[in-house]
Amino acid sequence: MFDLPKYGDGICLARMAELLERLSIDRARLQRIAVVVTGSNGKGSTAAMCAATGRAYGLRTGLFTSPHLFRFNERIQVNGIEIDDDTFARLKRSVEAAIADVSQRRGEKFGAFEALFALACLHFQEDECDFVVFEAGIGGRYDPVRLVGAHATCVTSVDYEHVELLGNTLELIASDKSDACAAGGTIIYGENCRGLRRHLVEYNRWRGCIPLFIRDEIAIDNEAQSGSGQHFDFQFGYHDFRRVELSLPGAFQFNNAAIAITLFLLWLQREQPRKAPGRIETAIRSGLRDTRWPGRLETIQQNPLTVIDVGHTPDGIRQSLASLTAIHGAGDWILVTGASRDKKADEIVGTLAPSFDTVICTAAHHKGADVQGIAAAARLANPSAGVRVAATIEDAVQFSQEIARTAAQKVYVAGGLFLAIEYATVLKGGRAEDLNFF
């Protein structure tokens, strides 16, 4: 979209501030209307549920997420509608002109994600959004979303990812993500951050940030999941909601939904206090029930049953696999797997392969790791499995669908985002090489 590298020169905060000023972004208003979602897994689902709740409450709601799955436009939405091509093109010209000016004065190059973040801010301002949910790209300390200055943020989960940028311990990674929150704000931490509680309490103490933890200050109870839907009980402060229904599958969505609810409640308490509790509860129930977010344990075909998952960290993959078997049963599955070259392919495949008797190993067109290496990792993790190599995604779709139809089995596609989305595209008659990612 932009003729820019993925990352810009060094730390982006100063040049981003100058860019937003050049675009006349009202940052004080942006801070008032926005919340920020960070984390290793679950950011997109959490952001989508929070935005859907805002819409259900009657707020004109913006949503900024990444990465996209099929089109760039997915990343920027207002009231659930993607930015249209004409608006995208017009704002792109404005952002490019501003970047050229700032780059010349500062002698620094911007990155594509920075440009897209600025475009989103401009779109939300022009569209007069009342409430905006921003999903971070990488981390939070030096991510453009820190420029929002949000007083309500979250860390959905923490796992080893982007260690060359964020640090090689969970404490360092969680600390980096926490820094998206403005001083004096509140940070909601997902359930798998509880083991870091003592560190995070001390880390936030002198910035005056209040940490809240799922299953400690924010209660989840009576979770139930099935293929037809799931529900749970939620309690935070004086809010006590029973049997809140979710449209998104997977046990990990209870964590994400509780965070989304609390983010919205914190924002509402700060910006629009003294609102009717009944109206709030109605909006929360409607928002979570109506949220749609592709790629996470998504059923893309019924016959044979075919489920894809875009999770790409070991912890996220373990959670998705557990939910897959809880919802659809453990038997009669064919695994289609692969990983991106910059991910922990051996650990990812080693997490998945032991649960399947048939494993088809392949490589995505975009950044796919060597297929022979994937197959070796699968054989090492599960010597008794039938491991087959598919040189391309197209071959993997053909092999897996033929085997599933012949043997009355089901297909699970997991290991990476590009793998899952390319598989879904080919299955629906598209071309994987036509997809554009950055």
Image (tube, rainbow, N blue to C red):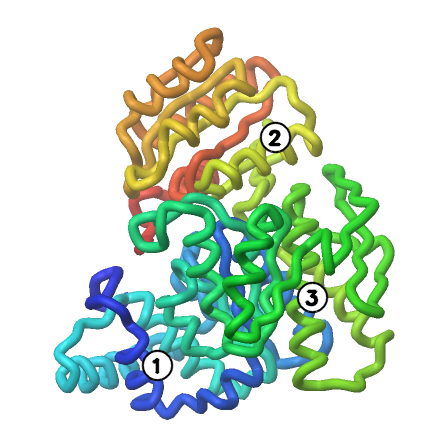
Circles 3 and 1: CB atoms closer than 8 Å: no
Considering only vertical position in the picture, is 88 above or below 347? below
Rendered image: mark on residue 305: 2
The 10 Å Cα crowd at callout 2, few under 14, some 14 to 19, many 20 or more, is some
Please tell me which of labels 2 and 1 falls first in the chain.
1
The N terminus appears in which quarter of the rendering? bottom left
> Who's the residue at 54% across and 88% down the image?
128
Mark 3 — residue? Answer: 262
Say which element carries label 3: helix
The 10 Å Cα crowd at callout 3, few under 14, some 14 to 19, many 20 or more, is many
State the residue in front, 19 or 403. Answer: 19
**Of marks 3 and 1, the one in the foreground:** 3
Q: Position of residue 15 (x, y in %)?
A: 26, 79
Whole-angstrom CA distance, mark 3 to mark 2, is: 35 Å
Circles 2 and 1: CB atoms closer than 8 Å: no
Where on the picture, by quarter, is residue 209? bottom right
Where on the picture, by quarter, is residue 137? bottom left
State the residue in front, 336 or 178. Answer: 178
Q: Position of residue 415 (x, y in %)?
A: 44, 35
Say which element carries label 1: helix
Mark 1 — residue? Answer: 91
Please tell me which of labels 3 and 1 falls first in the chain.
1
Q: Position of residue 263 (x, y in %)?
A: 65, 68
**Of marks 2 and 1, the one in the foreground:** 1
Left/right of residue 186 with respect to residue 336 in the rendered view = right
Say which element carries label 2: strand
Please tell me which of labels 3 and 2 falls first in the chain.
3
